[in-house]
Image (cartoon, rainbow, N blue to C red):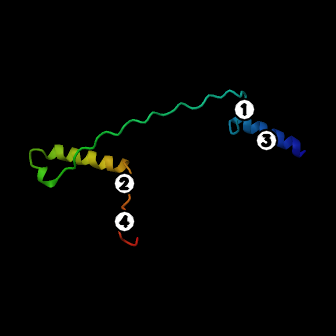
């Protein structure tokens, strides 16, 4: 009885796609992803650069800077030479 239940369970899982049975041995490797070089970062927006005439452009540059900072990993701070930490 346990053998029949195991067979039925294995068949049900295979049919629903939960378990894949190898049909052929010549499986192709997944295609490799090509890394794209990062785009050069724009210089940060400084308070002295913002004026009434370019406020919208400065706001757009600040938004791009924040978006870029959210995506790029931040470097970990390193200990100063000669410190105990």
Whichever of callouts 3 and 1 sits on the residue coming sooner in the sequence is: 3
Q: Which mark is residue 9?
A: 3
- Residues under labels 2 and 4: Cα distance? 16 Å
- Residues under labels 2 and 3: Cα distance? 49 Å
Instruction: Name the front one of labels 2 and 1.
Output: 2
**1 vs 85: above or below:** above
Whichever of callouts 2 and 3 sits on the residue coming sooner in the sequence is: 3
Q: Secondary structure at mark 1?
A: loop
Q: Which mark is residue 74?
A: 2
- Residues under labels 3 and 1: Cα distance? 18 Å
Instruction: Name the front one of labels 4 and 3.
Output: 4
Q: Is the C-beta separation of discs 4 and 1 under 8 Å?
A: no
Q: Which residue is mark 1?
A: 22
- Residues under labels 4 and 1: Cα distance? 52 Å
Q: Looking at the picture, how far across and down is residue 76, in whole percent?
A: 38, 59
Q: Secondary structure at mark 2?
A: loop
Q: Looking at the picture, how far across and down is residue 81, in whole percent?
A: 34, 66
Instruction: Name the front one of labels 3 and 1.
Output: 1
Say left or right for 13 vs 53. right
Q: Which residue is painted at 9% across and 44% down in the image?
A: 53
Q: Nearer the viewer, residue 21 or 18?
A: 21
Whichever of callouts 4 and 1 sits on the residue coming sooner in the sequence is: 1
Category of crowding for the residue at label 3, using alpha-carbon neighbours closer than 10 angstroms: few (below 14), some (14–19), many (at least 20): few
Q: Nearer the viewer, residue 54 or 25?
A: 25
- Residues under labels 2 and 1: Cα distance? 43 Å
Q: Quadrant of the N terminus?
A: top right
Q: Secondary structure at mark 3?
A: helix
Category of crowding for the residue at label 4, using alpha-carbon neighbours closer than 10 angstroms: few (below 14), some (14–19), many (at least 20): few
Q: Which residue is painted at 29% across and 50% down in the image?
A: 66
Instruction: Name the front one of labels 2 and 4.
Output: 4
Q: Which mark is residue 79?
A: 4
Q: Is the C-beta separation of discs 2 and 3 under 8 Å?
A: no
């Amino acid at each position: 009885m346990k053998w029949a239940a195991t067979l039925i369970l294995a068949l049900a899982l295979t049919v629903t796609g939960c378990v894949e049975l190898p049909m052929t041995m010549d499986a192709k490797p997944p295609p490799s992803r090509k890394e794209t070089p990062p785009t050069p970062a724009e210089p940060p927006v400084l308070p002295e650069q913002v004026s009434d005439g370019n406020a919208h452009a400065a706001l757009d540059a600040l938004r791009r800077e924040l978006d870029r900072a959210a995506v790029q990993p931040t470097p970990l701070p390193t200990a100063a030479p000669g410190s105990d930490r």
